[in-house]
Amino acid sequence: MFKRLFWLIVGAGFGFGVSFWLMRFVRETVNRYSPERVSSDLAGALRSLGGDIRAAAAEGREAMRERESQLREELAPRR
């Protein structure tokens, strides 16, 4: 009798614990994909993408200037 009561209590406790964890997981997932959160994450990603594109363009321009100066030195008439 006590064995069955023990396992009943253990099973009920485990069931309550799992249901609590599952509800918390579902709430966090719903909040993660809410329109406000998604739009703020997207805006942040686009801002960082814009910064990355500007940095890449500046680096490309600098490399272009260096290469152009190298080519001018190679093609300049030697005196």
Image (spheres, grey):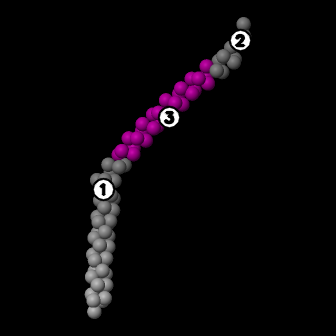
Distance, label 3 to label 2, CA atoms, is 34 Å
Amino acid type assigned to the residue bearing label 1 in the image: Pro
| Image side of residue 72 versus residue 39, left or right | right
Could you tell whether 71 is left or right of 40 in the image? right
- Dominant SS of magenta comes to helix
Q: Which numbered circle lies on residue 35?
A: 1
Identified at 34% across, 53% down, the residue is: 38
Closer to the camera in the image, 5 or 73: 5
- The secondary element bearing badge 1 is classed as helix
Mark 3 lies on a secondary structure that is helix
- The disc placed on residue 77 is 2
Please tell me which residue is depicted at 61% across the width and 24% down the height of the picture. 67
Q: Which residue is mark 3?
A: 56
Question: Label 1, label 3: how many angstroms apart (C-alpha)?
Answer: 31 Å
> Residue 31 falls in which quadrant of the image?
bottom left
> Which is more toward the observer, 1 or 33?
1
**Percent position of residue 54, x then y:** 45, 34
Tell me the quarter of the image containing the N terminus: bottom left
Residue farthest along the front direction in this orientation: 2
